[in-house]
Image (cartoon, helix red, strand yellow):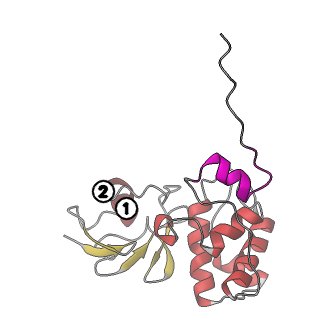
Amino acid sequence: MPRMTVNDRPLEFDMDPETPLLWALRDAANLTGTKYGCGNGDCGSCMVLIDGAALRSCLVTIAEAEGRFITTIEGLSRDRSHPVQQALVAEQAIQCGFCTPGIAIAAAGLLRENPAPSEAEIRAAIPNLCRCGVYPRLVRAIQRAGRVTRRVETISAAPAPGISTEDAAREVPALRAINPPADSE
C-alpha cells in the first residue's frame, strides 16, 4: 500500500498502486480541489506539488508518489493567504475557477524556484489551459505574487473564509452587511 505525505499528513492508500495520484487524492483523500480536466496531462487542472515541483497528478501513479511529499491546493494555505492565491484575487485573474487550483499550484512551484520570474519564464512554467483566457492577468498576478514573496509588496486581501458578514464589511469597505427585513405582521 503506497504511503506518502499529503498536505503534511502521512497517508497510506489501500488502492491499486497504478492508480493515478489524482484519483487517490480526490476519491480516497477527499481533496477535491485538484481537478480532473483531460486525464492525459495536457490541461494542468490536476497540478500538485510533489517534493516542491509542480506535476500533473493524472500522470503520476500512487506507486510513483510513494514516500514523497504532496501538496494540493488545500495544503497551499488553509486561509488563502499564500501570495499566489492573494495575487490571483487582487489581479482578478480568476474567472470560472475550474483551472485556478492547478494554476495556483504551478505558480507556487515556479515562485519557490524563482521568486522574480520574467514574463517569458512565467509563460514557460505555467502550461495550464484556461478556457476563460485570463493569461494577461495571470502573468501580472504571478509577478505580483513574486514581489510579495520577496517582501517588496504587500496585498490588502479579502478576508479569510468563514468570516462573518459584519466583520467582512469592516475589513473590506466595498462589502456591505445587509440586515434582513423586519417581519411585518
- Examine the rendered structure and indicate whether residue 149 appears above or below residue 21: below
Mark 1 residue crowding within 10 angstroms, few (<14) / some (14–19) / many (20+): many
Q: Quadrant of the image for the C terminus?
A: top right
Q: How many marks?
A: 2
Residue 185 is left or right of residue 173, and the answer is: left
Residue 175 belongs to the span the image colors magenta:
yes
> In the rendered image, which residue does mark 2 sit on?
28
122 or 32, nearer to the observer: 32
Residue type indicated by callout 1: Leu
Mark 2 residue type: Ala
User: Rounded to the nearest whole Å, what is the CA distance between mark 2 and mark 1?
Assistant: 6 Å
Residue 101 - label: none
Residue 17 in the image: x percent, y percent?
A: 24, 68
- Which quadrant of the structure image shows residue 172? bottom right
**Residues at circles 2 and 1 in contact by the CB criterion of under 8 Å:** yes
The residue that disc 1 covers is 25
- Residue 4 at what x, y percent from top left? 30, 75
